[in-house]
Image (tube, rainbow, N blue to C red):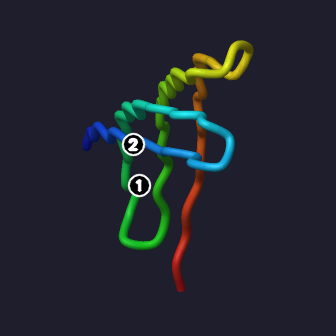
Amino acid sequence: VAAGLDYSFENFIASGRDDSGWDFRILADYFLNDFLAFGAEYVYTQRDSTVAGLDYDRNMILLRARGRL
């Protein structure tokens, strides 16, 4: 199990636009054996912009299977 939080700030000087964003994620992996694992991850992303219409919130759920030889 792991979790993370990221913050970003972008300044677009030519257009006068500033964006700030947050990413929060939490994930868990389950190892069936040494060669096979299944996992799930939740990611929430938020962006705030000084330009109208460029703000957004996004929720993603990712499922994965991993194997190694």
Residue 56 image-quadrant placement = top right
Disc 2: CA contacts within 10 A as few (<14), some (14-19) or many (>=20) = few
Q: Secondary structure at mark 1?
A: loop
Residue 10 image point, x, y percent: 48, 45
Tell me the element at label 2. strand
Q: Which mark is residue 69?
A: none
Which residue is pictured at 40% across the width and 30% down the height? 22
Q: Nearer the viewer, mark 1 or mark 2?
A: 2
Residue at image location 56% in from the left, 24% down from the top? 49
Q: Give whichever of 8, 18 is nearer the camera.
A: 18
Residue 63's spot in the image, x, y percent?
Answer: 60, 40
Q: Seen in the image, is 32 located left or right of residue 3? A: right
- Residue highlighted by disc 1: 32
The Cα atoms of the two marked residues, 1 and 2, are separated by 36 Å
Amino acid on which disc 1 is placed? Leu
User: Which amino acid is tagged 2?
Assistant: Ser
Point 69% across, 22% down: residue: 54
In the figure, is residue 67 to the left or right of 34?
A: right
Image coordinates for residue 2, horizontal then vertical, percent? 25, 43
In this rendering, the answer to whether 28 lies above or below 45 is below
Vertical relation: 11 (above or below) 52: below
Which of the two discs, 1 and 2, labels the residue nearer the N terminus? 2
Instruction: Give the residue at mark 2.
Output: 8
Looking at the rendering, in which quadrant would you find the N terminus? top left
How many C-alpha atoms fall within 10 Å of the one at disc 1: few (<14), some, or many (≥20)? few
Task: Name the residue rendered at 51%, 21% in the picture.
Answer: 48
